[in-house]
Image (cartoon, helix red, strand yellow):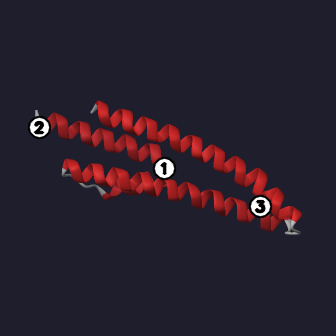
Amino acid sequence: MEKYLRKYFIAILVLMLLNGVINAFVTAQLQIILLRNNFEFATTKNLTQILSYSLIYIFNSILALIIFFDMKKIGKRSIPILLLTVLQNWIGIIFFLIGYNNELNNKE
């Protein structure tokens, strides 16, 4: 259990850092670059929002794949946990750890 706690704690910290860096870059730098190239403000705003949300979902999907492979090792797969991970990474991780803890308690 400690192995998974460490692994997913580090994963959440890395994802939070990546999300912050990407949001800072996309909202600040990309928007300025697009405005300098004569794009309208509304267009640049929409484009940067779509890009930042898409990148967050891509990172969450990668995390969901990691959780899927860990579920495969355990022998229990749960589609709702994977969907929660794609939508909100920390909620999916919490439910995965709760399910894994229940599996450990049932084996004892």
The residues tagged by marks 1 and 3 sit, at their Cα atoms, a distance apart of 23 Å
| Image quarter of residue 106 | top left
Q: In the rendered structure, which amino acid carries the disc numbered 1?
A: Gln
Q: Which residue is mark 1?
A: 88
For residue 85, side relative to residue 48 (left or right): left
Residue 32: x, y in percent? Answer: 83, 57
Q: Quick one: SS at disc 1?
A: loop
Would you call the spot at circle 2 few (<14 residues within 10 Å), some (14-19), or many (20 or more)?
Answer: few
Q: Which residue is mark 3?
A: 45
Q: Which mark is residue 54?
A: none
For residue 48, side relative to residue 38 (left or right): left
Residue at 78% across, 53% down: 29
Mark closest to the chain's N terminus, 1 or 3: 3
Task: Tell me, yes or no, whether the two marked residues, 1 and 3, touch with CB atoms within 8 Å.
Answer: no
Task: Tell me, yes or no, whether the two marked residues, 3 and 2, touch with CB atoms within 8 Å.
Answer: no
Query: If the image is split into quadrants, where does the C terminus sit?
Result: top left
Mark closest to the chain's N terminus, 3 or 2: 3
Q: Quick one: SS at disc 2?
A: helix
Query: If the image is split into quadrants, where does the N terminus sit?
Result: top left
Q: Quick one: SS at disc 3?
A: helix
Q: In the rendered structure, which amino acid carries the disc numbered 3?
A: Lys
Residue 56: x, y in percent? Answer: 56, 54
Residue at 60% across, 47% down: 19
Name the outermost residue toward the left. Answer: 108
Task: Tell me, yes or no, whether the two marked residues, 2 and 1, touch with CB atoms within 8 Å.
Answer: no
Would you call the spot at circle 3 few (<14 residues within 10 Å), some (14-19), or many (20 or more)?
Answer: some
Q: In the rendered structure, which amino acid carries the disc numbered 2?
A: Lys
Q: Which residue is mark 2?
A: 107
| Image quarter of residue 51 | bottom right
Residue at 51% across, 59% down: 58
